Amino acid sequence: MADVEAFGLAVLVTALIGTVAVLSNRFSERARIPAPAIFLVCAAIASDLWPRLGSVSLPTIEKVVTVALAVILFDGGMHIGRRRFRSAAAATVWIGVAGTLITTAALALLAHYAFGMDWRLAMLLGTALAPTDPAVVFSVLGRREIAGRTGTLLEGESGANDPVGIALLVAVLGATGGGLSAVGHVTVAFLQQMVIGGAVGVAGGMLLLAFMRRVPLPSEGLYALRVLFGALVIYGLATVAHGSGFLAVFAAGILLGDERAPYKREIERFHSSLASLAEIVAFIMLGLTISLRGLGDGGAWWIGLIIAAALAFVIRPVFVGLLLWPVRLRRSERIFVLWTGLKGAVPILLGLFILQEGLPGVRRAYEIIFVVVAFSVTVQGGLVPELARRLRIPLRVVEPEPWSLGVRFQEEPEGLHRYQVRAGSAADGMTVDELPCGEDVWVSFVIRGGRLVPVRADTLMRAGDEVLVLAPDTPDLEAVFTRRRDSAS
């Protein structure tokens, strides 16, 4: 019975911690401090107060956080979707890959020449700190969603540079020898990770979509689980094939994002909730690996703050800013993108990989990574909402919609479409009767601000409206609601 009671106590404590973590999002929204920062710092404080909390082995934490990150990236890919990704694909890939590489190089130079780290450790530190974290950015923004190309670029860059950074670190850790031989090994290993991961992700995403559409299951609850296990299969296959499993799940999520499938809304809600849980677990477990008392022993505090300031005010604005120059953005959007390259779980996870290598000075490097992440999510992240307001970045408030009205069909309905009216599209500002859709089109539902709008001939369409349309499947129909007039040609 004593074991049962001890287990019950552990379940109670874990559940209470989870409840507090969920409720902390309310505090996070008001204080403009990202919820991940709260999880990370509180876990680090708790591990100092109760040392037994830090007894979980590093390999165990690494494995748990790896699975959590795969879940987060898959959900992030689904949130972006193929349509949004296509609108900024070239810029996303360019910034995600080239931005990660140039940031790594700049950080390695700084760590070597300013703080005397040997080249290998400096390179590993730079690689770990290069990726950004979309979860931190959108935790700061709360219910506000960045509209247009800026939001897509930020999400896409963060999702793309995580697999790039991880693949680069794996390649650096596996490099042998020195000089040109090591550079060649890193380059080949990195390209292999990217190519195999991308190929497995695209092929796996297409197969998973076909599986979702064509193979029925006896229970509604099994559909979301099937997609989860399918995503993990894709991760595992890519990893076993010496590719980037993280890139694979991200690419698969993008492919599935806009596609129709049975119980798609339920699948998306399940994965969104699971990604939130994964974020909580990842940051809490990573926080347990740090002792705040020991950060000052090797100068990790002041070195980390210098590197964090250099990243925020010099390295990203200058080097990534040069890469961003050809991308079509307004000046205010460009400044916002450069500031919101926030660090999160991935740098600390990569720090764990480095920590287990046992190199001289690796513990101090891990503590430096923690300080940089803590600065990024609290100081930089805390300023994101105010910066967005001052730069007049277009934000859309996403109000909660706790009540739903749904219609279920046994077979996929033919000709039933759901669109969101885009600002500046042909439908924006037109009445239902004026829509250039032909006589075979029937607008059945209009949802505005979470409320149903009566549909009559003189009902005016507005940007942001969700419209349910029954019509023949033609490409011109989608353009009426989603394509801007100035790009219609």
Image (tube, rainbow, N blue to C red):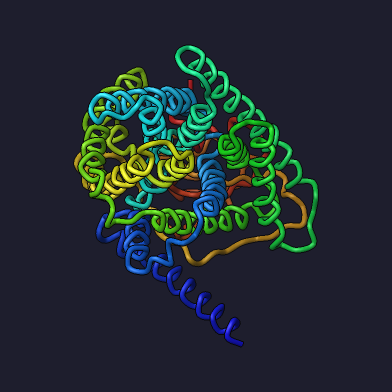
Q: Is residue 476 visible?
A: yes
**Foreground pick, 478 / 116:** 116
Describe residue 38's horizontal placement relative to residue 437 as left or right. Answer: left
Q: Residue at x 57, y 54 (%)?
A: 271
Judge left or right: residue 315 versus residue 478: left
Placement of 350 over or under 224, stated as above or below: above
Q: Position of residue 54 (x, y in %)?
A: 43, 61
**Image coordinates for residue 347, horizontal then vertical, percent:** 41, 41
Q: Residue at x 44, y 42 (%)?
A: 355
The residue most toward the bottom is 1
Report the label total.
0
296 is higher (above) or lower (below) than 162:
below
Residue 148 screen position, x and y as percent: 39, 36
Foreground pick, 104 / 215: 104
Residue 71 appearing in the image: no
Residue lying at the far front of the rendered structure = 360
Residue at 69% over, 44% down = 233
User: Seen in the image, is 424 located left or right of residue 388?
Assistant: right
User: The N terminus lies in which quarter of the figure?
Assistant: bottom right
Residue extending farthest to the top is: 180
Residue pictured at 25% horizontal, 35% vertical: 307
Closest to the observer, 457 or 447: 447
Asked whether 485 or 233 is in front, the reply is 233
Residue 111 x/y as whole percent:
29, 29
